[in-house]
Image (spheres, helix red, strand yellow):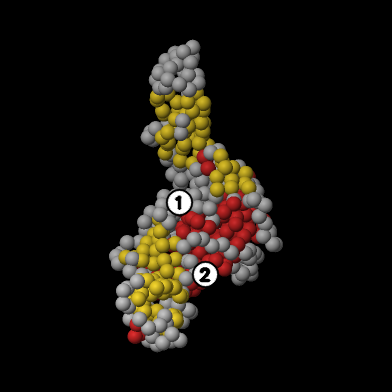
């Protein structure tokens, strides 16, 4: 029996196709024990091939096989649990035996879809990451990736058909961004659930927009939303009268246009490698009032793509950017793809985010992201220096933009929870007072003042 083999196939029932299908690359691990005293005499692991089949050499008579088939990628991609394994025992007389191993169907479906997306991701972006654990659980909770424990959570509503294909590729996009692109530095305040055509903030739009884009470039039309994102810029399916830099669908469409074939749309004259975009997202930084920051929104990424922060852009577009994170300079780390063309890049983001092909006051968002073309400005009035622990008042005056205004005051960076044009306070030591004014459409302007504290300062009550 020593020349014999034990063979098997790893399969699952695909509810989408209504048939049993193979599970490629699943791991089969075996411990060999002596039949008489149960002592361990050996062991090995084999991987199912592309057809889900595997073969194990027979250890000979009086040897028992204790094995596990697990949804752990032989290529080091991902591992699906908690129901992603099945155990078996082959007693000594089982050489030349063949069997099918039936895996938990939804867990196997997540594994199969994830394996395809990850292999395509590595090929497209020329970057990889360590194995990511995935948990499948029955339930209606929205799928998500948790960076704290580097874990993807998939639920029964996000497994089958094109939506399941999209979901696992989208969530792996988050995991890829976290470990292969330097981390999710801009998670933003994304609601759950969130939608392609929802307006949230620039951080949320970049994080979710990249995950959407990742799903499309790794699974193409097998994934839900592929056609919407591919045709977004030319059909304007999502943004109307608003700032596309705060919408994940618009950001996903822009990223897709950067790497899809040139000429597929009249305004699209570029096709850059996915590796270039991945490198840029990893290394791009911008200078802000708070210091250097990695890209916290598509506006920052645009500056690195254009290799400049042009006032003709920063003073007219992306006006929903908070002033403390507004870029004054960029560092694209010397990255330039073959055929780099600033004008062609500008045309892409203008079309995807604002529906324009040349610089102008954004007509599509005049009422909500540029204050009708008016720039919101602020001025801060109040004493300085002041006496220790004496109540004094500072005021902020806003002009431009679109009323009504909302107000936020910070002292040494701490929010004072005061939505008023006046701030009254006292302090025993010197401090910095800052006022942030936001108009009705969401444009913001900030002004600050350093205030010294001295016993010889004039009284605030003079």
Residue at (42%, 15%) from the top-left corner? 461
Q: How many marks?
A: 2
Q: Position of residue 195 (x, y in %)?
A: 41, 60
Element type where label 2 sits in the image: helix
Q: Quadrant of the N terminus?
A: bottom left
Is 411 in front, or is 196?
A: 411
Per the image, label 1 sits on a secondary structure element best described as loop
Q: Quarter of the image containing the C terminus?
A: top left
Q: CA distance from mark 2 to mark 1?
A: 25 Å
Q: Which residue is nearer to you in this view: 280 or 244?
A: 280
User: Which is closer to the viewer, label 2 or label 1?
Assistant: 2
Q: Residue at x 51, y 46 (%)?
A: 321
Residue at far top of view = 456
User: In the rendered image, which residue does mark 1 sit on?
Assistant: 187
Work out whether residue 122 or residue 211 is closer to the camera in this orientation and state it.
122
Quadrant housing residue 66: bottom left
**From what the image shows, is residue 337 above or below residue 396?**
below
- Circle 2 residue: 119
Name the foreground residue: 40 vs 391.
40
Query: Is residue 53 visible in the rendered structure shown here?
Result: no
How far from the left and from the top, in percent, is residue 210? 50, 59
- Residue 355 badge: none
Tell me which residue sits at (45%, 86%) in the image: 3
């Amino acid at each position: 029996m020593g020349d014999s083999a034990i063979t098997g196939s790893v399969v699952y029932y695909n509810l989408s196709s209504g048939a049993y299908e193979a599970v490629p690359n699943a791991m089969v691990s075996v411990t060999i024990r002596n039949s008489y005293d149960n002592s361990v005499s050996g062991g090995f692991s084999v991987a199912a091939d592309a057809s889900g089949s595997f073969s194990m050499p027979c250890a000979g008579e009086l040897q028992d096989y204790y094995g596990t088939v697990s949804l752990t990628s032989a290529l080091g991609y991902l591992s699906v649990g908690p129901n992603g394994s099945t155990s078996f025992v082959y007693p000594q007389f089982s050489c030349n035996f063949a069997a099918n191993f039936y895996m938990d169907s939804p867990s196997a479906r997540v594994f199969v879809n994830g394996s395809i997306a990850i292999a395509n991701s590595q090929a497209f972006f020329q970057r990889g990451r360590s194995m990511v654990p995935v948990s499948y659980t029955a339930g209606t909770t929205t799928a998500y990736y948790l960076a704290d424990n580097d874990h993807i959570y998939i639920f029964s509503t996000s497994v089958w058909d094109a939506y399941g294909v999209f979901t696992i590729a989208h969530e792996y996009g988050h995991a890829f961004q976290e470990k292969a692109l330097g981390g999710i530095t801009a998670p933003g305040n994304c609601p759950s659930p969130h939608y392609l055509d929802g307006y949230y903030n620039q951080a949320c739009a970049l994080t979710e927009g990249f995950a959407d884009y990742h799903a499309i470039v790794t699974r193409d039309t097998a994934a839900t939303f592929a056609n919407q994102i591919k045709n977004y810029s030319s059909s304007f399916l999502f943004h109307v009268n608003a700032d596309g830099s705060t919408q994940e669908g618009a950001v996903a469409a822009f990223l897709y246009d950067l790497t899809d074939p040139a000429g597929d749309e009249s305004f699209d004259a570029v096709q850059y490698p996915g590796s270039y975009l991945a490198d840029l997202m990893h290394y791009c930084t911008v200078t802000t009032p708070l210091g250097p920051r990695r890209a916290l929104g598509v506006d920052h990424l645009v500056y690195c793509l254009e290799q400049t922060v042009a006032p003709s852009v920063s003073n007219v577009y992306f006006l929903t950017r908070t002033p403390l994170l507004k870029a004054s300079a960029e560092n694209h780390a010397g990255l330039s793809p073959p055929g780099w063309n600033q004008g062609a890049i500008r045309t892409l983001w203008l079309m995807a985010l604002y529906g324009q092909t040349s610089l102008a006051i954004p007509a599509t968002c005049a009422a909500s992201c540029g204050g009708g073309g008016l720039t919101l400005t602020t001025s801060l009035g109040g004493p300085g220096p002041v006496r220790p622990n004496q109540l004094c008042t500072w005021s902020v005056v806003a002009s431009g933009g679109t009323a009504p205004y909302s107000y936020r005051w910070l002292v040494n960076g701490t929010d004072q929870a005061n939505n008023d044009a006046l701030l009254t306070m006292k302090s025993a030591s010197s401090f910095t007072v800052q006022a942030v004014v936001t108009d009705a459409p969401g444009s913001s302007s900030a002004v600050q003042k350093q205030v010294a504290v001295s016993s010889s300062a004039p009284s605030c009550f003079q």
